[in-house]
Image (cartoon, rainbow, N blue to C red):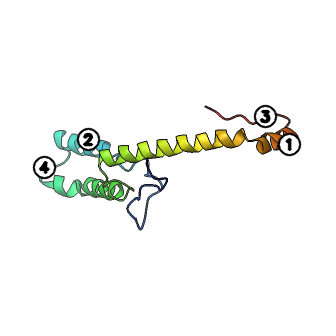
Amino acid sequence: MASDAPTELPSETTVPTSLPANAFDFLPDLHALLQRVFNDELDPKDVAHESSRIRLKMERARVMVSELPGVNRSLEEQKKEIRELEEKIERQRGIMRAVSKMEVVTEIAARVGGEKMEMDP
């Protein structure tokens, strides 16, 4: 039987709450740069300089991903945590069903709402 204690996540100093929608949207910039080279609008020797903005954007995306909680955990560790959490939810649902059937709870529910409390299966 698994413990009710949650699996510990690595402590992060700054955990992003969400990633910007365009954080990984560097392909259009890369495509535009390549188009400029192929259309002879940009000298190939200037590609390194012109691509620095794209490299910077890719590096920022790499940093954002590395700061996500649990990113260093293996797939098996993540699956194990999901199984443990699903088991915990099922135990809690069972407890809630048992409590909802207790005489004192059904009496209170009848007085307050006039209906018996029912729990989803």
Numbered tag placed on residue 44 in the rendering: 4
Against 23, is 100 above or below?
Answer: above
Using the rendered view, name the quadrant where residue 35 is placed: top left
Camera-near label (2 vs 3) is: 3
Give the SS element for disc 2.
helix
Numbered tag placed on residue 112 in the rendering: 1
Q: How many residues crowd around disc 2 within 10 Å: few (fewer than 14), some, or many (20 or more)?
A: few
The one nearer the camera, 41 or 61, is: 61
The one nearer the camera, 61 or 111, is: 111
Q: Could you give the CA–CA distance between mark 2 and mark 1, rounded to whole angstroms? A: 65 Å
Answer left or right for 72 relative to 42: right
The one nearer the camera, 6 or 12, is: 6
Q: Are marks 3 and 1 in contact (CB under 8 Å)?
A: no
Camera-near label (1 vs 4) is: 1
Numbered tag placed on residue 70 in the rendering: none
Amino acid identity at mark 2: His
Q: Quadrant of the C terminus?
A: top right
Q: Could you give the CA–CA distance between mark 3 and mark 1, rounded to whole angstroms? A: 10 Å
Answer left or right for 88 relative to 46: right
Q: Are marks 1 and 4 in contact (CB under 8 Å)?
A: no
Name which of mark 1 and mark 4 comes first in the sequence.
4
Q: Residue at left 21%, top 42%? A: 34
On the image, the x and y values in percent for residue 22 come to: 40, 48
Task: Give the residue number, with chain letter if any, for mark 3.
Answer: 116
Q: How many residues crowd around disc 3 within 10 Å: few (fewer than 14), some, or many (20 or more)?
A: some
Give the SS element for disc 3.
loop
Amino acid identity at mark 4: Pro
Q: Residue at left 25%, top 55%? A: 55
